[in-house]
Amino acid sequence: MKSLKGQLVIAAPSLETPFFERTVILLIEHTEAGAHGIVLNRPSETTVGEIADQVLDEPFEWEKRVIVGGPVPGPLMIVHDDPELADRTIIPGVYCCVDPDKVRAAIRRRIEPSLVVVNYAGWGSGQLESEFEYETWVTIPAEIGHVFREVDDDFWDEVVQVANAKKLSEYLGIKRLPDDPHVN
């Protein structure tokens, strides 16, 4: 399977696993060794200011909500648009950092747009690919607007519609769908 890094991995409507139901995951890495990404639509009630003592070893005020990126414990990560603070590029214009110094710098600067993420979603070698065989997930290419948007209840519905339109156009052999079919 070709790498899905930079794709949105979207829970199929039939997926009823409690944590992953109606999730939209940004895939950060996908290799033969496995895959990992972050759930974009699971904001917590916790703010960066509430975890600053643990991260910065000092009090810090920032009312930005922390995103729960998945069920796998991991380091604090910041997804942002500043290449100078990047550990890696996810898609052009979207970067992430887990390096503690870069995370501190991003928080101190209150970098925006950004997502402050705890935990991640991960799959072992071949696991994600086997889940695709059961049509557990659908994918579309991630765009900056998907990553840095205000999370609301409509997000999953919107990306499922895009994925369904993509699947239908592939099935029908339509090479390009108009951005807004209503203007036809």
Image (tube, rainbow, N blue to C red):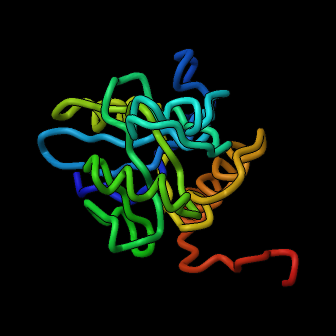
Quadrant the C terminus occupies: bottom right
Residue that sits furthest to the bottom in the current view: 184
Question: x, y (%) of residue 135?
Answer: 45, 34
Tell me if residue 135 can be seen.
Answer: no
What residue do we see at 50% from left, 58% from top?
140
Quadrant position of residue 93 = bottom left
What residue do we see at 58% from left, 75% from top?
174
Question: Would you say 3 lies left or right of 60 here?
Answer: left
Compared with residue 3, is residue 178 higher up or lower down, i.e. above or below?
below
Q: Is 55 in front, or is 171?
A: 55
Q: Is 162 in front, or is 73?
A: 73
Compared with residue 44, is residue 115 higher up or lower down, i.e. above or below?
below
Question: x, y (%) of residue 83?
Answer: 35, 73
What residue do we see at 47% from left, 62% from top?
80
Residue that sits furthest to the front in the current view: 58
Compared with residue 118, is residue 180 higher up or lower down, i.e. above or below?
below
Compared with residue 110, is residue 62 higher up or lower down, i.e. above or below?
above
Q: Is 66 in front, or is 174?
A: 66
Question: x, y (%) of residue 87?
Answer: 26, 60
Q: How many marks?
A: 0
Question: x, y (%) of residue 107?
Answer: 48, 52
Quadrant position of residue 23 = top right
Question: Would you say 103 lies left or right of 145 here?
Answer: left
Question: Would you say 113 lies left or right of 124 here?
Answer: right
What residue do we see at 70% from left, 46% from top?
151
Residue that sits furthest to the left in the current view: 33
